Amino acid sequence: MAELLIPADVEVAVKREIDASLVGTRFEGAKVGTKIPLEPKPTHFIRVTATGGGQRDLVTDAPTVVLDAFSVDEQDAHDLAAVAVAVLQRAGRVGTLGGAPCYEVRVGGLPANLPHPAVNTHFGFTATISAALRRVAA
């Protein structure tokens, strides 16, 4: 019987990578998760959402991830999104993203000003990436 090859959890990998990389930056302590935080919202936060993607080969997937970066300051919202993109691109060059083997990270959409209607207290910028992640054997 052939072994099961399970897709990596890209949201967890991206969250781990961004969390670890914000330490020592002006965005240290920013909340990174898959949901918009409840009130009171932190000054800076990122929502990570897997939105599909595809399989590159038998053992590698290329999931698409949307990064929604929010801040009470418009420039900080842009910069937080840009830093998140740079962090993930670096992970692709290094070869591991949040502990998952990663072969590359491609940017599908650079940070764009896209306010969220449910978050009227913060500015929002959105970016899209695709990460080539190795599946894990079950």
Image: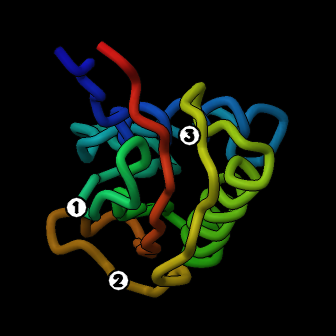
Q: Which one is in front in this view, the residue at disc 2 or the one at disc 1?
A: 1
Residue 22: quadrant of the picture: top right
Residue at left offset 55%, top offset 76%: 107
Amino acid tagged 1:
Thr
Sort mark 3 into few (<14), some (14-19) or many (20+) by Cα contacts within 10 Å: many
Q: Is residue 51 above or below residue 74?
A: above
Q: Residue 94, percent across and down? A: 79, 45
Q: Earlier in the sequence, mark 2 or mark 3?
A: 3
Mark 2 falls on what kind of element?
loop
Distance, label 2 to label 3, CA atoms, is 19 Å
Residue at left offset 77%, top offset 48%: 26
Q: Residue 8, percent across and down? A: 37, 33
Sort mark 1 into few (<14), some (14-19) or many (20+) by Cα contacts within 10 Å: few
> Where the C terminus falls, by quadrant?
top left
Q: Which one is in front in this view, the residue at disc 1 or the one at disc 3?
A: 1
Viewer-nearest residue: 38 or 126: 126
Residue at left offset 24%, top offset 72%: 116
> Where the N terminus falls, by quadrant?
top left
Residue 113: quadrant of the picture: bottom left
Distance, label 1 to label 3, CA atoms, is 22 Å
Q: Are the residues at dot 2 and dot 3 in contact (C-beta closer than 8 Å)?
A: no
Q: Earlier in the sequence, mark 2 or mark 1?
A: 1
Amino acid tagged 3:
Ala
Residue carrying label 2? 114
Residue 16: quadrant of the picture: top right
**Is 35 situated left or right of 104 in this image?**
left
Residue farthest front in this picture: 1
Residue carrying label 3? 30
Sort mark 2 into few (<14), some (14-19) or many (20+) by Cα contacts within 10 Å: some
Q: Is residue 134 above or below residue 106?
A: above
Q: How is the image coloured?
A: rainbow
Q: Residue 108, percent across and down? A: 47, 80
